[in-house]
Image: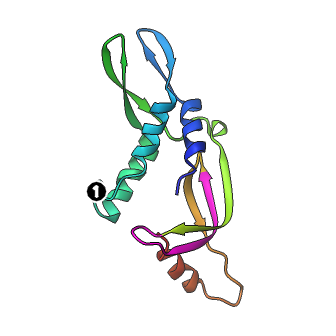
Amino acid sequence: MLLESVLAEQILKINKFTYRGTEHQFSAGDAEEAVRKLKPSPIEQRGLVRTNQDIYDQILLGTTIEKTIDGDRKSYSVRYIDWENPANNVYHATTEVSIERTGTNATRRCDIILFVNGIPFAVIENKAPTESVVQAVTQQIGYP
């Protein structure tokens, strides 16, 4: 679950590229392509562990976008998170969000989700003091 409009806006805010000594902005279409790269289709998925590793690597290292300027085609780096200047990122928290499980219409309700630039970074499961930690962990394992 991505906050896609937030992520696209942040991609445009924190990324620029230089071509022949001149700094340029990425386009809205470039931002949409970068967002799409964080949402692999079922065909692109390579198993849970490998797909999660690929997404982790993209969030940590960024991705590339091809641009053609004056007939010259080059790849430029795009960051999802500004790791050097955390104040350039935006942070959100949501409560009681229902998320549809992959491949089904079934949903799970997450108590709290923390986002950085529209990317979910943490899921917090709240339990009553009388309930066990094991129950919370088991419930989180079942999240999509």
The residue that appears at 46% across and 46% down in the rendered structure is 59
Of 76 and 67, the residue lying toward us: 67
Asked where in the image residue 70 lies, by quadrant, the reply is top left
Q: Residue furthest right?
A: 129
Of 43 and 17, the residue lying toward us: 43
User: Which residues, given as a range, are shown in magenta?
Assistant: 101-115
The residue that appears at 45% across and 9% down in the rendered structure is 21
The residue that appears at 53% across and 80% down in the rendered structure is 139
Horizontal side, residue 71 vs residue 81: left or right: left
**Secondary structure beneath label 1:** loop
Q: Amino acid at mark 1?
A: Ile
Asked where in the image residue 117 lies, by quadrant, the reply is top right
Residue 16 visible within the image: yes
Horizontal side, residue 132 vs residue 75: left or right: right
Q: Is residue 34 above or below residue 68?
A: below
Q: Residue furthest front?
A: 105
Q: How many marks?
A: 1
Q: Is residue 99 magenta?
A: no
What is the basis of the colouring in this image?
rainbow
The residue that appears at 67% across and 52% down in the rendered structure is 92
Q: Counting other residues with Cα less than 10 Å from the Cα at mark 1, is it few (<14), some (14-19), or many (20 or more)?
A: few
Q: Is residue 108 magenta?
A: yes
User: Magenta segment, principal secondary structure?
Assistant: strand
- Give the x, y percent position of residue 18: 45, 16
Label 1 sits on residue: 43
Residue 82 visible within the image: no
Of 112 and 101, the residue lying toward us: 101
- Give the x, y percent position of residue 88: 64, 36
Q: Is residue 79 above or below residue 108?
A: above
